[in-house]
Amino acid sequence: MNTQDLLRTIKNRRNTKSFTEEDVKKSDIELILESAIWAPNHRNTEPWRFVVLDKNSPLKKDISSSMIKLQELSSKSTLTEDQKKNIILSIDKSPCFIFVFTTLGENPEMTEENYGAVCCAIQNMQLLATTLGLGVGWSTGKISKINNLNKLLEVDETLRIVGVLSIGYPNSNIEKSREEFSSLTKWL
C-alpha cells in the first residue's frame, strides 16, 4: 500500500450506524482483531480484551433485555412495545459486535496509558475493516453502559469497557469533510 492509498483509507473510514444483512466472515473478524493487537502500547502492557458476538449469538437477547432495562431506568418510565421492538431490532440487525475492554494499570497513569492504547487498537480495527469493505460503529453510549455488562459477557470485573463496535457491510458511505489541518495547527 502506498502513502496515498493509506491516506484514502483513513479519509474513507466512517463511524457506521446502518448495515446490510450480509454476514461478516469469521476470517475477516480475525484479521480485524489481529490488527488491534499491533497498536502501540506503552510498557508493552497489551491491555486490550475482546468479546465477539456474531449475528446469531444468543447473548443478543440478553443485551436487548439489558438495554431495555437501562433505558427504562434512565427515563424512569416503562418503554412502549414499539420502543422495545426498536431496541431489539437495532441489536438484532447488527451483523457483529465486538465489546472492547481495557485492563486497569497499577496506578492512574498506567490506566490512562492502557486506555489510550486500546483506543489506538480500535482505530487499527476501523482502518482494517475499511480496507475489507466493512463499516464499524464505535459506541460508548448505552450499550456500553449496561448494568452487569462484565458479568453478562463473562469477563473479569476489573476490566473497563472502552467501546462496543458494530461491524458489517455499510448501507452507504457518506462523504465527509474536515477542516484543513493548517487551520488547526500552530507551527513554532
Image (cartoon, grey):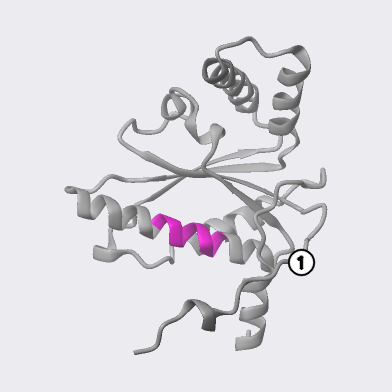
In this rendering, position of residue 175 left or right of residue 145: right
Q: Residues within 10 Å of mark 1 (few under 14, many from 20)?
A: few
Q: How many numbered discs sit on the rendered protein?
A: 1
Residue drawn at point x = 28 percent, y = 63 percent? 44
Q: Amino acid at mark 1?
A: Glu
Residue drawn at point x = 58 percent, y = 15 percent? 72
Location of the N terminus (image quadrant): bottom right
Image location (x, y in percent) of residue 30? 58, 55
Residue drawn at point x = 39 percent, y = 88 percent? 187
| Residue 2 showing in the rendered view | no
Q: Is residue 19 magenta?
A: no
Image location (x, y in percent) of residue 176? 71, 66
Residue drawn at point x = 59 percent, y = 24 percent? 67
Write the start and end of the magenta stretch as one range.
118-125
Image location (x, y in percent) of residue 110? 23, 54
Give the main secondary structure of the magenta stretch.
helix
Location of residue 126 by image quarter? bottom right
| Residue 5 showing in the rendered view | yes
Location of the C terminus (image quadrant): bottom left
Residue that badge 1 annotates: 175
Location of residue 128 by image quarter? bottom right
Q: Is residue 123 magenta?
A: yes
Image location (x, y in percent) of residue 49? 42, 46
Point out the residue furthest to the top here.
78
Towards the viewer: 107 or 25: 107
In this rendering, position of residue 115 left or right of residue 56: left
Point out the residue furthest to the left here.
107
